[in-house]
Amino acid sequence: MKQQSKSNRWLTAALLTPTGLWFAFMLVLPLIVILVFSFGERAAVGGYAGGFTLEHYANLGARLKAFSNTLTYAPIGTFLSLLVAYPLAYYLAIKVNRRYKLMLLVLVIVPFWTSLLIRTYAWIYLLGGKGIPSILDWIGIEDVRLINTPGAVLMGIVYGYLPLMVFPIYVSLDKLNKSYLEASSDLGASPYKTFMQVTLPLSMPGVATGCMLVFILLMGEFLIPAFLGGGKVFFIGNALVDLFLQSRNWPFGSAISITLVVIMLITVSLYMRMTLRNSKTGVDESLM
Amino acid sequence: MTAQSKITKTYDIEFKGVTKRFGDVVAVDNVSLSVERGSFFSFLGPSGCGKTSSLRLIAGFDQPTEGDVFIGGHSVVGTPSHKRPVNMVFQQYALFPHMDVRDNIAYGLRQRSPKPSNQEILKRVDETLEMVRLSGYGKRRVWELSGGQQQRVALARALINRPTCLLLDEPLAALDRKLRSEMQMELQTLQRDVGITFILVTHDQEEALSMSDRICIMREGKIVQSGSPRDLYDNPRNRYVADFVGKTNFFNGKICDVNATGATIQIDSGLSLLGAPAKGAAPLIIGGKASIAVRPEMISITAADHTKFHPGVSLPGKVINRIFLGERSEYLIETQGHGEVLVLSPKNITGSTQSFVPGDQVSISWQAESALVLADT
């Protein structure tokens, strides 16, 4: 008996080793490197030179605009994605005929078989002078500017992150027992009241998961603001690209990265605590 | 009051030529029925017979393809479920998992407009909790409750709305046997106390027989027979009903003679047996396939060497199994060439003579009047 549990322990250890090593080398180690860098000096030709200084953290204010942009656009983008994704997920999970369900779900993912870079290039064309504005011009709405505006960035965000929001919500709506909806209607609730009192609260775990996924990834986004914002909307991600690749100020970039990680940890843990307390279902927390 | 509503006023639920099709499948096939106010009515049948579909037509989850459904004398075709004065107890209860017991029960009242005051709602919830014997459980989460308790919450959630009619969709199927028979008693008492019409859907004949005032037996979307439990048991119209309600011995054969008092069937083993025709059944046709049905309690059992003269049918046989059920015993008898026969024998008052063990040679007999001739359908 004891022998068996011992060999079981070895097996468990053996199976967990690859994951453990992966985490150590791909997550913990780089994070330590970044942390060390953030306290160092910039070498004369760029990159990292040793030493210990808090100068980069003191200098964070220089990139305040990137922080405030990211912290404004990420929640707004998440919220807009939710507004677009929820009706779609609802339709796919509850309304659509079973026969077409799989096909429609695949259609949601199909765009992701092409890289985001290429799809964003396509949007540059669509939103640019020869795209949608020229059509608007033709029907009489003149001088509409779409590309390189905050609106274009938000549109790109919603477009790019939609499936990440749709799928968790779809899953929680799909496994929602339809007899709850019938029970609500049977007890006199109109379809609108049934949605507000039963469907929406019971799909909250999916909403929470989707929002978290989109929000976390948006905090590190740089492609969409760079391409569709025309350099006017500057995210932390863009600051990092600039600092690491252009001006080669690695310690300052590292300090910004560490600050971003800390901000993310705080917001996500606050958010999780909030949604866990509010979700009274007690059955769906496995999704978190 | 118009003449029309006078005629229908004692009926809470009526179906007039109701048909429900799902694509090519006919779930309910031209069904007409009426459920008397304040009665306990059951739809009984195997799965897929149309009983749940009928219930959903009353609840308003589905609309009939043809025909008319009336609640309290008014046609409700086209009326959505949230505007119908009926409430349902769902098979798996469908209690809202994100609400506690009290909020579940108060749900119906909170949908009303004008909405009752919070005090009024709390008072009604407490009264209803008391009615289903769950006082003090208001703050519990529904998933913390046992199956029987969840069942009661589901009942309370429906009854608090004082519906015209309470619909119960296999409400006891998820409970264990002992709890089920307890809840059967409770449901019956509750129905008498609140005086609301109950419509039950079940595949369990015992459940239907023990609780209902009236049972409607369904098969493939059609009503086969409806009547009081006693009536269905004593006068099954065909073999399907006799087989579904209670236990019955069948001897299959062909009709070879029909007269005023009954018919003679030549059963497959060659023997000719007499039986009374079933009430309300289609006329028997000579040469048609039919069976003789005898309820196990109508058969008496005696030792093989017994010399008593039997006025009816008498067959020799051998005891192959005996199940002791306390106040009675169930014997399975292997007859010579006529198959196995189930006999229900009450405990003898003298207690001594009538006890047989497997292997005993016996003689079974019944009166010709207690056998029914049922045409195969």
Image (cartoon, rainbow, N blue to C red):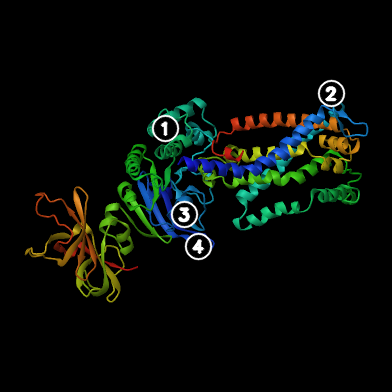
The residue under the point 78% across, 53% down is A114
How many angstroms separate mark 1 from mark 4 (CA)?
40 Å
Q: Earlier in the sequence, mark 1 or mark 4?
A: 4
Label 3 secondary element: helix
Chain under numbered label 1: B
Using the numbered discs, state the Cα–Cα distance from disc 1 to disc 3 in whole angstroms: 29 Å
Residue B104 vs residue B159, the one in the foreground = B104
Where residue B213 sits in the image (x, y, percent)? 32, 48
The residue indicated by pointer 1 is B128
Residue B104's label in the rendered image is none
Label 3 marks a residue whose chain is: B
Q: Nearer the viewer, mark 2 or mark 4?
A: 2
Viewer-proximal residue, A252 or B170? A252
Q: Residue furthest left?
A: B307
Please tell me whether residue B81 is drawn above or below residue B221 in the rendered image: above
Mark nearest the camera among 2 and 1 is 2
Residue B162 percent location from the top left of the image: 43, 37
Q: Can marks 2 and 4 be said to lie on one chain?
A: no
Secondary element at tag 1:
helix
- Outermost residue toward the right in this view: A45
Horizontal side of residue B165 vs A72, given as left or right: left
